Image (tube, rainbow, N blue to C red):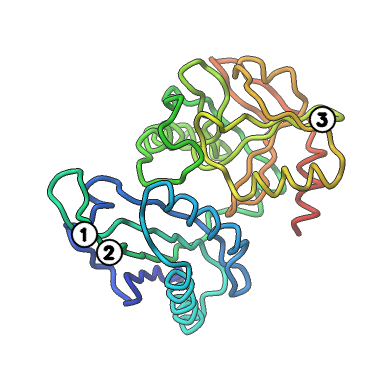
């Protein structure tokens, strides 16, 4: 089967060439969003743009929403021309080029990069049957300098993902690594937010000090409020997750993945219930 094409657009031009002077490459000076292209349309585009622009303000990167939206539309036209209806879309904004040192030039022009990638393998399989998680040895620094911001400095997640890759080679259903802060408190997955549940309540880790404010996480929080579910956002040592009956992870690409089992310090913790995960999946569908 022929793999879907990977397309790249830089500042409105279809090219995969990037100047070596780009500050995103040199210093991680930028931020990104990962969206789902579904049935030829960007999913949850408004929420992604709101988070992206909020991050740009925090990083003092000046870029107009109109420019971003124009390039998104240009890229969508190319995707439609290539008959790509379902894909992962990565939107990257860097501060642009210039400056040998950390101090950016006053006239730096932000660069907008758009890429398409194939959807993860067996996406629907894991939505239906669930996954296994490990707990990464790599921790997340807390408090973070920019909690909630999806900036380009993601080395902690890269190192944890190497651990995950090694574990998934042994067991294919191991599809996420949970990450803790330096105090051993559950924070997030390498690419997802985490929810735990008992029969009548939901819990999710706070991201006030570190972590990503995921779009799907916010949708689940909103749904919990609409449904009147009991919800706690707080801190929890990862060793205490065995007090819950259900776990699921979520992001904009995978949607909701129920978790069947988590390995914590060599102990296998089982999660026999998927009630909240199934109900949220139905609403999203």
User: With respect to residue 8, does 106 lie above or below?
Assistant: above
- The x and y percentages for residue 158 are 38, 38
Left or right: 248, with 104 as reference point: right
Residue at mark 2: 109
Q: Earlier in the sequence, mark 1 or mark 3?
A: 1
Q: Residue furthest left?
A: 100
Alpha carbon distance from label 1 to label 2 = 7 Å
In-image side of 246 versus 227 (left or right): left
Q: Position of residue 232 (x, y in %)?
A: 74, 29
Asked where in the image residue 108 lies, by quadrant, the reply is: bottom left
Other-residue count near label 1 (Cα within 10 Å), few / some / many at <14 / 14–19 / ≥20: many
Do the residues bearing badges 1 and 2 touch, measured as CB atoms within 8 Å? yes
Total marks placed: 3
Check disc 3 and report the residue beneath it: 201
Relative vertical location of residue 61 with respect to residue 168 in this rendering, above or below: below
- Residue drawn 30% across the image and 48% down it: 29
Spatial distance from mark 1 to mark 3, Cα to Cα?
A: 48 Å
Q: Which mark is residue 97?
A: 1
């Amino acid at each position: 089967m022929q793999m879907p094409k990977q397309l790249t657009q830089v500042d409105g031009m279809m090219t995969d060439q990037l100047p070596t002077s780009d500050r995103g490459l040199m210093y991680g000076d930028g931020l990104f969003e990962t969206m789902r292209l579904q049935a030829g349309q960007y999913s949850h585009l408004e929420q992604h743009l709101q988070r992206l622009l909020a991050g740009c303000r925090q990083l003092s990167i000046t870029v107009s929403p109109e420019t971003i939206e124009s390039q998104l539309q240009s890229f969508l036209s190319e995707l439609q021309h290539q008959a790509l209806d379902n894909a992962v879309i990565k939107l990257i904004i860097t501060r642009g080029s210039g400056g040998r040192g950390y101090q950016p030039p006053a006239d730096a022009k932000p660069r907008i990069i758009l890429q398409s990638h194939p959807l993860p393998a067996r996406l629907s399989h894991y939505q239906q049957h669930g996954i296994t998680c490990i707990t990464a040895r790599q921790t997340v620094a807390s408090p973070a300098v920019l909690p909630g911001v999806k900036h380009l400095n993601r080395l902690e997640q890269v190192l944890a993902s190497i651990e995950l890759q090694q574990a998934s080679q042994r067991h294919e259903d191991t599809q996420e690594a949970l990450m803790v802060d330096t105090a051993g408190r559950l924070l997030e997955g390498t690419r997802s937010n985490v929810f735990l549940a008992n029969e009548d309540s939901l819990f999710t880790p706070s991201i006030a000090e570190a972590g990503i404010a995921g779009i799907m996480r916010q949708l689940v929080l909103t749904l919990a409020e609409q449904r009147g579910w009991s919800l706690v956002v707080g801190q929890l040592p990862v060793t205490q997750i065995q007090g819950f009956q259900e776990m699921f992870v979520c992001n904009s690409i995978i949607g909701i993945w129920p978790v069947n089992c988590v390995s914590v310090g060599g102990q296998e913790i089982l999660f026999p219930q998927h009630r909240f995960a199934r109900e949220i999946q139905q609403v999203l569908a």
